[in-house]
Amino acid sequence: MAVRIEWRSKRDGEDALLAVEDSSNTILEAWEVNPGVLTDFLNDMRALDDRTSRDTRDVGDQTPEEWGELVIARSPTGDVLDVDPELYWGGVAYWFRSRGSDPHLWQGAARLVPR
């Protein structure tokens, strides 16, 4: 069974991550978005499993589209399958830049060019 993880948004702050089965387009799990979960999703999909195991939401019979517009879809290995650049950068601005943070795990951790 092939699965993809989608970040979907209805509007700023009303976002969710969905695990969606590819062939049937069925939602297997849904999680609330917060800066920590989103950082894991954008940087290291392996950490996403640990963080989201306890924060699931009821999915009922909803389709992915009912959770909002697709921001970005990734495979479980991290490959980007689809992205809407405008929604992506708007989401990054809302969840990170407006709070004075960045979604990159290694921000300021190393200098690439020595002085």
Image (cartoon, helix red, strand yellow):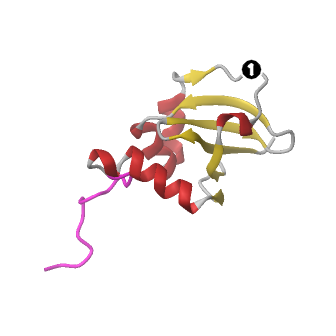
Give the x, y percent position of residue 10: 59, 39
Residue at 54% in and 60% down: 86
- Residue at 74% across, 32% down: 27
Position of the C terminus, as image quadrant, is bottom left
Does 6 sit above or below residue 58? below
Where's residue 33, x and y in %? 49, 35
Q: Where is residue 34 in the image (x, y as percent from the top left)?
A: 43, 35
At horizontal 86% and vertical 39% (from top left) the residue drawn is 24
Left/right of residue 36 with respect to residue 20 in the rendered view: left
The amino acid beneath tag 1 is Gly
Q: Is residue 4 visible?
A: yes
Q: In this view, does 80 lie above or below 95?
A: below
Residue 72 left/right relative to 44: right
Question: Which residue lies most toward the right here?
Answer: 24
**Residue ID for mark 1:** 60
Rendered image quadrant of residue 22: top right
- Magenta-span inclusion, residue 110: yes
Image position of 81 with respect to 67: above or below: below
Q: Is residue 78 above or below residue 31?
A: below
**Residue 22 shown left or right of residue 109 in the figure:** right
Total label count? 1
Q: Which is more toward the observer, 30 or 114?
A: 30
Query: Secondary structure under badge 1?
Result: loop
- 104 inside magenta stretch: yes
Q: As rendered, which of 110 and 39 lies closer to the eye?
A: 39
